[in-house]
Image: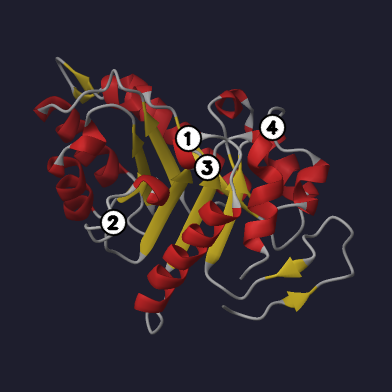
Amino acid sequence: MTTEQTTMSDPLSPSQTSLVPLSVSSATDRGVYRGYWRALSCYELSHQDLAAKAKRLRSWREEAPAESSFIARIDPKVISEMTSPDRGISSVAEAEIAKALTRVEALGSSLLMLHTPSSVRPSAEHERAIITLRERLPQSLPLAWRADGLWSESESFYELCAAQEITPVIDPLMWDEELPLPGGMFAYWKIMGGQGLSVRLGEYDLDKLADLADQWLTMREESEGKHLWVNFTSPKMIPAAKRWRELF
């Protein structure tokens, strides 16, 4: 694992600033707050944060430590309302894409998150919507896709992601150990819980996650631009997320 530098000048900065291409965030129960930055240096917008105006997002960026980062989000209805019977892409989808890009700009985000609910089932129509979304976004902006429900159980999900250069969101602790992790320069991991999906993560869970992260980073050691994002999905996981981040 990589030695980190210690930063003492900013009381809101995490105690260590990593040189590893790794960003760790956690869900909260009250949005991003000043104390959050004492624990972690990355924040993923929640679904509730989609209601925040650009002015508020810019204030979050200004109030956060300089070395911190944000993960922007796009409203999932962009997929179910992508097409219009008479004009191709719908005005609703166009508006949601524009709002998402505004969030990216306001927060200085280096990645956009799409989280579709289980109601967005695998279908040719939804595949076309995903392809259209990827085409409408800047090529230089990575897109991560968390697909609830049947998508993640099908090979077509990973094939679609690979073909469109989309980063599939997975839970590495639940991944079949006999299968290789998804390839690519970027990875996005959602930590849903430890054994039995408990929000209490034990040392075994954190050690396993560290080993998997080491493997992923080592395999791409010579690659420029690689990045691993890890999101812990419960506010109760923040202490474990902080402790795990400090391993690198």
Which quadrant, please, contains the N terminus? bottom right
Q: Residues within 10 Å of mark 1 (few under 14, many from 20)?
A: few
Residue 220 appears anywhere in the view:
no
Which of discs 2 and 4 lies nearer the camera? The answer is 2
Residue drawn at the location 66% of the way across and 35% of the way down:
235
Which residue does the numbered mark 1 point to in the structure image? 197
Which of discs 4 and 3 lies nearer the camera? The answer is 4
Query: In the picture shown, does residue 198 fall above or below 183?
Result: above
Residue 208 appears at what percent x and percent y?
47, 59
**Identity, as a three-letter code, of the amino acid under mark 2:** Glu
How far apart are labels 3 and 2 at the CA level?
A: 30 Å
Residue drawn at the location 14% of the way across and 44% of the way down:
155
Residue 36 appears at what percent x and percent y?
76, 45
**Identity, as a three-letter code, of the amino acid under mark 1:** Leu
Residue 80 appears at what percent x and percent y?
27, 20
Residue 79 appears at what percent x and percent y?
29, 27
Q: Which disc number belongs to residue 177?
A: 2
Which quadrant, please, contains the C terminus? bottom right
